[in-house]
Image: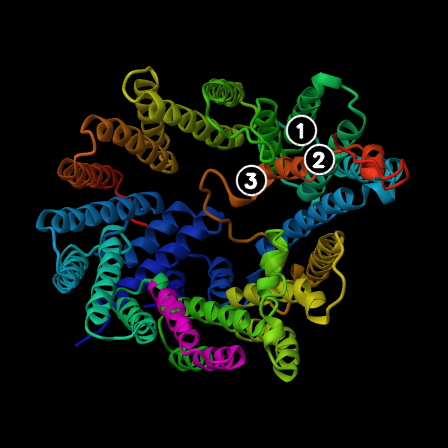
């Protein structure tokens, strides 16, 4: 039995058509040449555009949720075991429906079959969790079994349908398991690190040179996610960074004190080594997404460096990092542009492939929010008032407010 | 067959010339990789970090630094950025103008952000405009609009539109995102002004590619304002028919120009609006509530399915 639901050549044809559309958008091929490529890549699978896919997904989830809700409400279950069995049955029914739509009607990333598969995953795991909790499983055992079950089920959906987010759900669910054994923080991290490394090695073994392009592309994305997960496991100051961004000082040093010095400093070294290794590997294997992930991780490493060393953070630290990023980007652009044919080692700063236009970009949204952030950062009181407030500069220590 | 084999086949069939096929093969087999988008991304993140760092520094150390130092530093930064843009920028054209270099758009954005910071600081510290202090925003809006059109910069246009929204009373820092009646009407007024500006400039053929930014701002402000009206008055007001009309217009426009982002907006906002009214009418009876969501979501799925089949979206 073939695990994958869709014929590989069909998925490869979709990948080729996507590439061809990007070439057409960028003016690299003509409309006739695009038609010629489409003629050579026949498609039986039914697809839709991103926005319709989103709508299909949202409304199928809503419909499926309402069906389950109505059924549970009508039958007014008192017995948790029965409710659990019903949830599992609904999960199975939705899964069969997803398979049917994908197999019979050839829905491919259409939103409807995706929502049904995700709903099946949620209901099945919720049902199993309820059933197990009712049958004398302790809370600790349950907190291990349910994420493990979620990881396995999500992985099955990834294998069957090829949804990348199912693979990511599976990795995240598996990542939760080591934290449920009441181990020391260091052991938890080492366990998670080992699990992620094993998955990473498996993904490398599966990524053979002779596989289809669409599969190579998918593996590259999974490897990028795994590299990020490994980095987040290793970086003990990452919570502190979130705390700094949200201005919540309580979480700045939430975890690092709990680790022995050897683990702490090993993690410090690894926060530098992992991005360097990712960038090097990305360049060697020509995997753009891995290079990108490596670069982002390198920025995070620079942002958490001071926390690791216990140095004082200053308000201008983001600006220094920003100046570094701008400087490096400009230097790399100049260096690439000065090469023969504006290229060095196959890398170019020229804008070759234009992205699909979606109306408004995240960059536009960030720009729109900038004036609001600037406004929020303004000192609220006059310097003079602040200086004298509360009698800090004399005045007999009189209260600033009456 | 993979893409490389197909390209070789098309070259053999003379549907691709050899130079073109060679270039596409280089791209496909990753012998050429463009890092243009990555460089732009890091430039933008860098500029945003500089703006954040400068803002935090001013906020934390304004007593130590002194007004003169802060104002002169900020002024110097934005003046240098604007001088650079005016000396290096390409001449104005009605259509799309490519940036002279990869950093140009971000330098202009940096200048505008520092200008905002400078003006906001001066106003916060010295209250030059007194009770009319919010009017400094209008000066910023005018400047940003001018710069966005002069240098064909989407980021600065987004800043201009959000600064205009701030002048209407919508800010991130204040507690002004309540859609009480006062702000609801202002949001509608804002959305209509933005929409009219965008459509007018599109009709007179000035930077037609900016229309989407105007439409996104107008659609969200208008729909959220109308939705808040529907939430408050339910069916007993003009907000409900207005919302339905706006969603219908959005969907119609979307289908006409084949930009399906607006269908997404129309369906989501329209569905929420209708659901608020219906749920209110059925007085939260559980059976009817579930039945309503089952029936209507299936209807929406059927409608979108018909629409997608009509346009044969095969990507």
The answer to whether residue B83 is left or right of residue A209 is right
Residues flagged by tags 1 and 2 on a common chain: yes
Give the labeled residue for mark 1.
B144
Residue A179 image position (x, y, % from top left):
43, 74
Residue B183 image position (x, y, % from top left):
50, 21
Q: Closer to the camera, B60 or A357?
A: B60
Residue at 21%, 68% (x, y): give it: A128
User: How far separated are the C-alphas under marks 3 and 2?
Assistant: 14 Å
The answer to whether residue B122 is left or right of residue A16 is right
Q: Chain of mark 2?
A: B
Q: Secondary structure at mark 1?
A: helix
Q: Is residue B9 visible?
A: no
Residue at 51%, 80% (x, y): give it: A184
The dot on residue A364 is 3
Q: Secondary structure at mark 2?
A: helix
Residue B282 placement: quadrant: top left
User: Which residues, given as a range, are shown in magenta?
Assistant: A166-195
User: How far separated are the C-alphas under marks 1 and 2?
Assistant: 7 Å
Specify which label sits upstream in the sequence, 1 or 2: 2
Residues flagged by tags 1 and 3 on a common chain: no
Give the labeled residue for mark 2.
B112
Residue A90 image position (x, y, % from top left):
15, 58
CB contact under 8 Å: marks 1 and 2: yes
User: How far separated are the C-alphas under marks 1 and 3?
Assistant: 14 Å
Residue at 32%, 71% (x, y): give it: A139
Q: Considering the image in quadrants, where does the N terminus of chain B appear?
A: bottom left
Tell me the crowding category of disc 2: few under 14, some 14 to 19, or many 20 or more residues within 10 angstroms, Cα based.
many
Above or below, B194 relative to A173: above
């Amino acid at each position: 039995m073939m695990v994958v639901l869709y014929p590989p050549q069909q998925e490869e044809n979709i990948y080729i058509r996507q590439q061809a559309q990007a070439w057409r958008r960028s003016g690299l091929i003509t409309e006739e040449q695009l038609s010629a490529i489409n003629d050579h890549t026949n498609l039986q699978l039914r697809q839709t555009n991103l926005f319709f896919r989103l709508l299909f997904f949202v409304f199928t989830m809503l419909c499926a949720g309402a069906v389950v809700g109505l059924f549970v409400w009508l039958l007014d279950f008192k017995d948790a075991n029965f409710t659990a069995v019903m949830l599992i049955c609904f999960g199975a029914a939705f899964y069969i429906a997803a398979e049917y739509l994908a197999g019979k009607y050839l829905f491919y990333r259409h939103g409807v079959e995706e929502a049904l598969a995700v709903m099946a995953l949620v209901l099945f795991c919720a049902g199993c969790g309820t059933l197990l909790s009712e049958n004398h499983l302790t809370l600790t055992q349950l907190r291990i079994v349910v994420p493990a079950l979620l990881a396995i089920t999500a992985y099955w959906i990834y294998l069957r349908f090829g949804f990348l987010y199912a693979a990511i759900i599976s990795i995240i669910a598996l990542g939760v398991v080591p934290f449920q054994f009441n181990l020391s923080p260091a052991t938890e991290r080492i366990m998670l690190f080992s699990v992620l490394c094993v998955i990473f090695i498996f993904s490398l073994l599966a990524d053979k040179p002779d596989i289809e392009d669409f599969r190579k592309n998918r593996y590259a994305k999974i490897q990028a996610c795994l590299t990020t997960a490994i980095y987040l496991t290793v970086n003990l100051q990452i919570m502190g960074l979130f705390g700094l961004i949200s201005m919540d000082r309580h979480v700045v040093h939430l975890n690092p004190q709990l680790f022995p010095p050897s683990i702490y400093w090993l993690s410090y070294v690894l926060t530098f080594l992992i991005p360097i290794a990712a960038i090097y590997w990305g360049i060697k294997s020509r995997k753009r997404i891995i290079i990108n992930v490596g670069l982002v991780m390198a920025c995070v490493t620079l942002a958490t460096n001071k926390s690791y060393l216990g140095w004082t953070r200053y308000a201008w630290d983001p600006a220094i990092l920003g100046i570094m990023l701008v400087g490096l980007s400009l230097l790399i652009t100049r260096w690439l542009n000065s090469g023969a044919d504006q290229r060095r080692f196959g890398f170019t700063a020229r804008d070759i492939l234009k992205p699909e236009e979606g109306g408004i970009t995240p960059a536009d949204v960030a720009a729109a929010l900038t004036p609001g952030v600037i406004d929020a950062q303004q000192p609220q009181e006059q310097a003079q008032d602040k200086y004298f407030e509360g009698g800090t500069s004399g005045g007999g220590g009189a209260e600033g407010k009456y | 067959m993979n893409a490389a084999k197909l390209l070789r086949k098309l070259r053999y069939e003379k549907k691709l010339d050899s130079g073109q096929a060679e270039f596409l093969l280089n791209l496909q087999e990753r012998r050429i990789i463009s890092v243009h988008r990555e460089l732009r991304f890091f430039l933008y993140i860098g500029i945003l970090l500089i703006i954040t760092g400068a803002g935090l520094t001013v906020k934390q150390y304004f007593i130590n630094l002194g007004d003169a130092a802060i104002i002169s530093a900020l002024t110097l930064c934005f003046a240098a950025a604007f001088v650079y843009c005016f000396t290096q920028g390409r001449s104005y054209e009605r259509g799309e103008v490519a940036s002279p270099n990869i950093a140009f758009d971000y330098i202009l954005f940096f200048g505008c952000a520092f200008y905002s910071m400078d003006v906001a600081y001066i106003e916060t510290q010295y209250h030059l405009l007194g009770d009319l202090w919010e009017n400094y925003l209008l000066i910023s809006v005018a400047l940003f609009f001018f710069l966005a059109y002069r240098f064909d910069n989407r980021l600065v246009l987004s800043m201009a539109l959000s600064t205009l929204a701030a002048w209407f009373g919508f800010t991130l820092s204040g507690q002004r995102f309540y859609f009480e009646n006062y702000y609801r009407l202002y949001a509608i007024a804002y959305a209509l002004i933005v929409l009219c500006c965008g459509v007018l400039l599109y009709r007179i053929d000035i930077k037609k590619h900016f229309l989407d930014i105007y439409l996104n701002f107008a659609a969200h402000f208008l729909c959220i304002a109308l939705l808040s009206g529907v939430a408050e008055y339910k069916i007993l007001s003009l907000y409900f028919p207005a919302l339905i009309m706006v969603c219908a217009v959005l969907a119609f426009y979307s289908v006409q120009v084949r930009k399906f982002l607006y269908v997404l907006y129309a369906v989501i906002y329209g569905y929420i609006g209708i659901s608020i009214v219906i749920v209110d009418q059925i007085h939260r009876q559980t059976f009817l509530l579930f039945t309503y969501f089952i029936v209507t979501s299936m209807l929406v799925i059927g409608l979108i399915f018909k629409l997608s089949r009509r346009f044969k979206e095969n990507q």
